[in-house]
Image (cartoon, grey):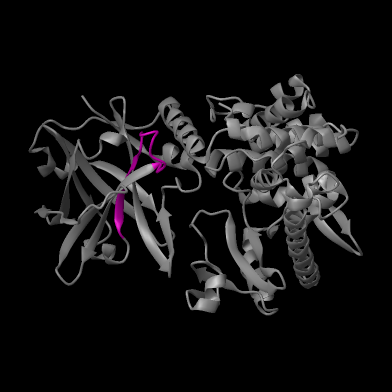
């Protein structure tokens, strides 16, 4: 799996392993090396700052300026982040009834390396109780921080392609960020991310309240910043590594595992593994620790005892990767996307106890509304009550759908979707969907496939049955062939609600951030 062009990647991996194991890095390693390529891999794996620290005495003369310039840019960004952090924490310290913790970022750099410039950081992440976030937004707004939408944001502001908002905006309705707030500094715009969840891993507000109480103060220069205690710092470092690999579709990143390895070694005598195990199992994040710590051991040797890792309980079989960690390090971006798709499709196949629907063979069954299946689609404004039946007609499935508590005209601004799992490993889209929207001017319902092809919209028939307007949605089996998993089709209803500008929320699908939510809330059409 290693290519001839991976000599420099081999070097980066070897240096990271030596740093993680406190071994000496010698100049002889880098004879005849391409330093531009090493720099590229160091940035890709987010280990550039620490590699610069260890390698700056070996860098070739012709490449030295590029490395120095990159570190200068990194240091400038960290200085701006620290300035923003000092300001924000100073502002919020006047409100002792609003607890918060610094996540990752500069405080983690200080904890692990005793040097805030030894680790990459792009923004400031602060965890709050969700109930406090409206007030936090208002407080920071008064001090020049702002929310923005557009593309690319916030830099589109200067080109008229972005819009400042007087209120926060979720990237998705179930997103872990309440919103981002920005301020312009010397190096560019610095984002302060107001977090309400630990990604999609921990969303329970009661658990977040508990986590906020496990804190310590981290001193950077003259100031103290609240952050997680050591046990929770380790847990959420592992969670961050797990989340990035599981949901981001980005190839594996060495920084995550180097951070964890060095953290465990530095605080070996301070970590209470029995307490950590109890908390992990209580939070239900055993799989997070198992995967991340096994990868740490694979890279750096047996840093964490196997018995300790085996003490974590896990509830699912997520992430049955076909490759080892080292093999995945050499996957191209495209190869990793294929591996990602295989992994997720496997999760669907192994999911049990999902409701199954066998299409009706009676072509007239749609006339009896009492025989329709029921579904509910949850949104922030209302719970959409859906009734539907599926008819098997030769090479087509006909879905007859009506809504008990809303008129079709509602879907003028908010399209209704039927989302399907995409089982094609060669395609990076995890779902395919049929999007339906109401045309007020023509008083018609239009459908369009959102499958990456240049599909034309077509009129979807609406018939009247017992005073109900029923949509007749024809699904040619040839069109949804990539939704087949053996003889099953996984599907879910959704609403695509435009919030503002380029922000849309997909309700009750969850797949854009956490595809396991899609699985847990979807149904199966079982074909004969």
In the image, 512 versus 332, the foreground residue is 332
Q: Percent from the top left, x then y, of residue 184?
A: 67, 74
In the image, 331 versus 407, the foreground residue is 331
Q: Is residue 271 visible?
A: no
Q: Locate the C terminus by quadrant.
A: top left
Q: Locate the N terminus by quadrant.
A: top right
Q: Quadrant of residue 478?
A: top left
Q: Residue at x 10, y 32 (%)?
A: 362
Residue 218 sits above or below residue 392 on the image: below
Residue 108 sits above or below residue 410 on the image: above
What is the chief secondary structure element of the magenta stretch? loop
Q: Percent from the top left, x then y, of residue 462?
A: 13, 55
297 vs 376, left or right, is right
77 vs 326, left or right, is right
Write the start and end of the magenta stretch as one range: 415-430
Residue 466 sits above or below residue 181 on the image: above
Q: Residue at x 14, y 33 (%)?
A: 395
Q: Is residue 440 visible?
A: yes
Among all residues in the image, which is located at the extreme top?
307
Q: Percent from the top left, x then y, of residue 514?
A: 50, 44
In the image, 22 versus 466, the foreground residue is 22
Residue 447 sits above or below residue 367 on the image: below
Is residue 417 within the magenta segment?
A: yes
Q: Quadrant of residue 147?
A: bottom right
């Amino acid at each position: 799996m290693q290519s001839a062009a991976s000599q420099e990647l081999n070097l980066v991996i070897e240096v990271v392993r030596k740093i993680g194991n406190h071994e000496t890095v010698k100049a002889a390693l880098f004879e005849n090396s391409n330093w531009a390529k090493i720099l590229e891999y160091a940035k890709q794996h987010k280990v550039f700052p620490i590699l610069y620290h260890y390698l700056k005495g070996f860098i070739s003369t012709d490449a030295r300026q590029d490395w120095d310039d990159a570190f200068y840019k990194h240091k400038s960004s960290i200085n701006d982040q620290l300035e923003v952090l000092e300001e924000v924490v100073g502002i919020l310290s006047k409100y002792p009834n609003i607890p918060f913790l610094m996540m990752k970022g500069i405080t983690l750099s200080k904890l692990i390396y005793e040097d805030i410039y030894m680790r990459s950081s792009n923004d400031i992440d602060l965890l709050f109780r969700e109930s406090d976030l409206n007030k936090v937004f208002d407080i920071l707004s008064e001090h020049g921080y702002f929310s923005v939408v557009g593309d690319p944001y916030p830099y589109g502001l200067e080109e008229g392609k972005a819009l400042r908002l007087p209120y926060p905006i979720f990237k998705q309705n179930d997103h872990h960020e309440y919103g981002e707030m920005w301020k312009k500094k010397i190096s560019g715009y610095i984002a302060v991310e107001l977090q309400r969840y630990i990604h999609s891993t921990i969303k329970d507000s009661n658990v977040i309240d508990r986590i906020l109480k496990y804190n310590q103060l981290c001193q950077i220069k003259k100031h103290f910043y609240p952050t997680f205690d050591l046990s929770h710092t380790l847990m959420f470092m592992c969670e961050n590594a797990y989340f990035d690999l599981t949901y981001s579709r980005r190839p594996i990143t060495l920084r995550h595992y180097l951070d964890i390895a060095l953290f465990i070694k530095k605080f070996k005598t301070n970590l209470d593994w029995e307490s950590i195990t109890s908390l992990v199992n209580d939070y239900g994040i055993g799989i997070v620790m198992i995967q991340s710590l096994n990868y740490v051991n694979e890279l750096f040797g047996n840093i964490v005892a196997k018995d300790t890792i085996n003490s974590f309980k896990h509830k699912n079989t997520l992430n049955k990767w076909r490759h080892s960690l080292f093999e995945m390090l050499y996957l191209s971006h495209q190869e990793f996307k294929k591996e990602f798709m295989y992994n997720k499709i496997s999760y669907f196949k192994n999911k049990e106890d999902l409701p199954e629907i066998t299409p009706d063979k009676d072509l007239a069954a749609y006339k009896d509304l009492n025989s329709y299946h029921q579904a509910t689609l949850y949104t922030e404004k209302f719970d959409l009550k859906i009734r539907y039946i599926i008819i098997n007609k030769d090479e087509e499935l006909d879905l007859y759908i009506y809504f008990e508590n809303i008129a079709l005209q509602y879907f003028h601004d908010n399209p209704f979707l039927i989302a399907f799992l995409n089982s094609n490993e060669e395609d990076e889209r995890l779902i395919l969907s049929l999007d339906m929207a109401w045309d007020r001017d023509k008083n018609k319902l239009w459908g369009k496939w959102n499958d990456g092809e240049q599909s034309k919209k077509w009129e979807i028939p609406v018939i009247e049955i017992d005073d109900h307007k029923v949509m007749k949605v024809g699904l040619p089996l040839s069109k949804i062939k990539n939704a087949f998993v053996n003889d099953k089709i996984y599907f879910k209803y959704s609403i695509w609600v435009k919030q503002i500008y380029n922000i849309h929320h997909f309700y009750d699908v969850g797949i854009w951030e956490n595809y396991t939510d899609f699985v847990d809330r979807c149904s199966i059409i079982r074909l004969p």
